[in-house]
Amino acid sequence: MLLDTASLYFRAYFGVPDSVRAPDGTPVNAVRGLLDFITRLVQDHHPDDLVACWDADWRPQWRVDLIPSYKAHRVAVETPEGPDEEETPDTLAPQVPIIAAVLDALGIARVGVEGYEADDVIGTLTGAASGPVDIITGDRDLYQLVDDARQVRVLYPLKGVGSLQVTDEAWLREKYGVAGSGYVDLALLRGDPSDGLPGVPGIGEKTAAKLLDAYGDLAGIMAAVDDPSSRLTPSQRKRLDESRAYVAVAPTVVRVAADVALPDFDPALPAEPLDPETLDALAARWGLQNALHRLLVTLGK
């Protein structure tokens, strides 16, 4: 089980009231919510391994170099030496180090790599997995990893993590007209304002799906642009032709990396805390005793 951790703690932050606070009054709603999410996921799905994948760099420079608008609207503070600071609610940002400390004390593997997003860690771990993989994320970008043959699916939270949309190839075909491998081409053609991806003007999701159905993949679509006998409309041909520079680099930006050099770590779900003393201190300081008790009972089963 691979957690897109930031996606989940953002959801926890907005789903749990900020009246949930530590003894000193500091909001800990994202921390508490994420711990409850993990408890529920372990209860419901019984994973052998669980990795909290981390955004060591939420906006990698190598992606920005190719598409400068990539996540540009979400930059709060530009940092010349990088990475830039992401726009984050004032009461969420201080909770992220607490989440990291609690996961580390629990012994739940937390893996991030400088210069890469959590998505890239997830892509690399998925590619290396020898058994079934469940990816827990509220980010549709990771639909590209869905692969029935390898038993890779995305569990997308609809309401907390108690109600998860099971995303497999049949669901993707019904919803988007593509399998997991075709989702990258669909996403880059239609664009994604939330990630600052412009897409091809005039090519929305339905048109992108129809083009992919007709021509197979992005390469086939671009070959059709150069083929006078193809059945592209004049406006489609013009817009795709004018977007060649974007189309050339967008796959590298949209496709998650599969070759990240990962640190050594133990993905096994811990039966007991790695550092009980530190965990007790964190629980007392931040008022997490009940949430951690629920999680520890679940881990120990």
Image: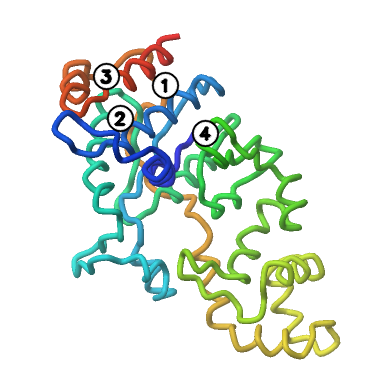
Q: Which of 102 and 243 is in front in this view?
A: 102
Task: Tell me the CA gap for discs 2 and 3.
Answer: 14 Å
Task: Tell me the CA gap for discs 3 and 1.
Answer: 20 Å
Q: Residue furthest top?
A: 301
Point out the tag, 3 or 1, that comes first from the N-terminus. Answer: 1
Res 201 seen here: yes
What's under tag 3, amino acid-wise? Gln
Q: Residues within 10 Å of mark 1 (few under 14, many from 20)?
A: many
Per the image, the residue denoted by label 2 is 103
What's under tag 4, amino acid-wise? Val
Quadrant location, the C terminus: top left
Res 53 seen here: no
Q: How crowded is mark 3: few (under 14 residues within 10 Å), some or many (20 or more)?
A: some
Per the image, the residue denoted by label 1 is 269
Camera-nearest label, 3 or 1: 3
Q: Which of 280 and 260 is in front in this view?
A: 280
Disc 2 and disc 3 in contact, CB within 8 angstroms: no
Q: Which mark is residue 161?
A: 4
